[in-house]
Image: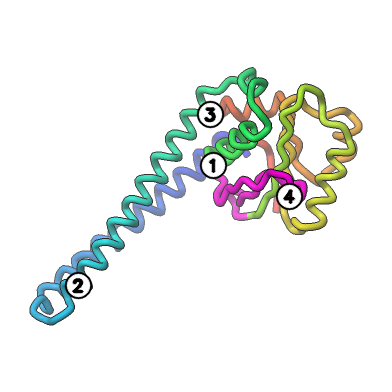
Amino acid sequence: MSVRRVRRVRRGRRGRLREALPLTVVLVLLGLGWLYDHADRPGVWMAVGAVTVLVLLAMGWWAWSRLRSARERWIVSRTGIAGIDTMTGRQFEEHVARLLRAHGYTRVTTVGGAFDGGVDLRAQTPDGRPIAVQCKRWRRPVPPNEVRAFLGALAGGHLGYLGMFVASNGFTREAVREAGDGMVLVDRHELGLWMAGERAPRLPPR
């Protein structure tokens, strides 16, 4: 998915918000009119208070999510490719999670650990498909047995998921052949382009 595609995804979301704004205004005006007509009835103000609390909570959640997204984009933009060599494995997983969110992926969750089932991250692609991600912050290229293990994880507990393998120092030739067309491989060069915002990993078509 190119940067141009990412920008189209973001513009599409903003466009949907602009389309929803007139309907929201109409609903608010209708609600105010109803309140004016029924203000003397018992329980009306209690209901208004409850709705107000819900609205404030929704606005707070929206503001928090926007601030988190902006902070993550800032962190990604400040991290160079050499910076990943100083990260721990968990920090690298969190970094890849930020990259996913910054490029339109949603429902990004970190599941790495002793019982991760061979998957470090789960997410939903910008076009709505589930994807499982394996991250390796290694000082050497990933060998073929690691790719086979990830393919096994996809065929087992993550059937129907796309697969993405992100390796800080790339893959051996044998590992690339082992992957075939079964997953998206992100080596050091591709990771650098992704972090710089020049090119996101290309996903297979539906």
In the image, which is nearer the foreground, mark 2 or mark 4?
4
The magenta stretch spans residue 56? no
Residue 60 pos. (x, y %): 33, 50
What crowding class fits label 3: few (fewer than 14 Cα within 10 Å), some (14-19), or many (20 or more)? some
Instruction: Give the secondary structure at mark 2.
Output: helix
The residue under the point 31% across, 53% down is: 59
Determine contact: label 2, label 4, CB under 8 Å. Answer: no
Of badges 4 and 1, nearer the viewer stands 4
Using the image, determine if residue 182 lies above or below residue 31. above
Identify residue type, mark 1: Arg
Which callout, 2 or 1, points at the residue further toward the start of the chain?
A: 2
Mark 2 Cα shell of 10 Å, populated few (<14), some (14-19), many (≥20): few
Viewport quadrant of the N terminus: top right
Alpha carbon of mark 2 to alpha carbon of mark 1: how far? 39 Å
Amino acid beneath label 2: Met
Mark in front: 2 vs 1: 2
Q: Which residue is mark 4?
A: 115
- N-terminal-most mark, 2 or 3: 2
Badge 4: residue crowd in 10 Å (few <14, some 14–19, many ≥20): few
Q: Secondary structure at mark 3?
A: helix
- Tag 4: amino acid: Phe
Q: Give the numbered dot on residue 76.
A: 3
Reading the image, the residue beneath label 1 is: 101
Among numbered discs 2 and 4, the one appearing first in the sequence: 2
Q: CA distance from mark 2 to mark 3?
A: 45 Å
Instruction: Say which quadrant the C terminus sits in.
Output: bottom right
Left or right: 118 as drawn, with respect to 6: right
What is the magenta range?
105-128
Q: What residue lies at 64% left-to-right and 32% top-to-bottom?
A: 92
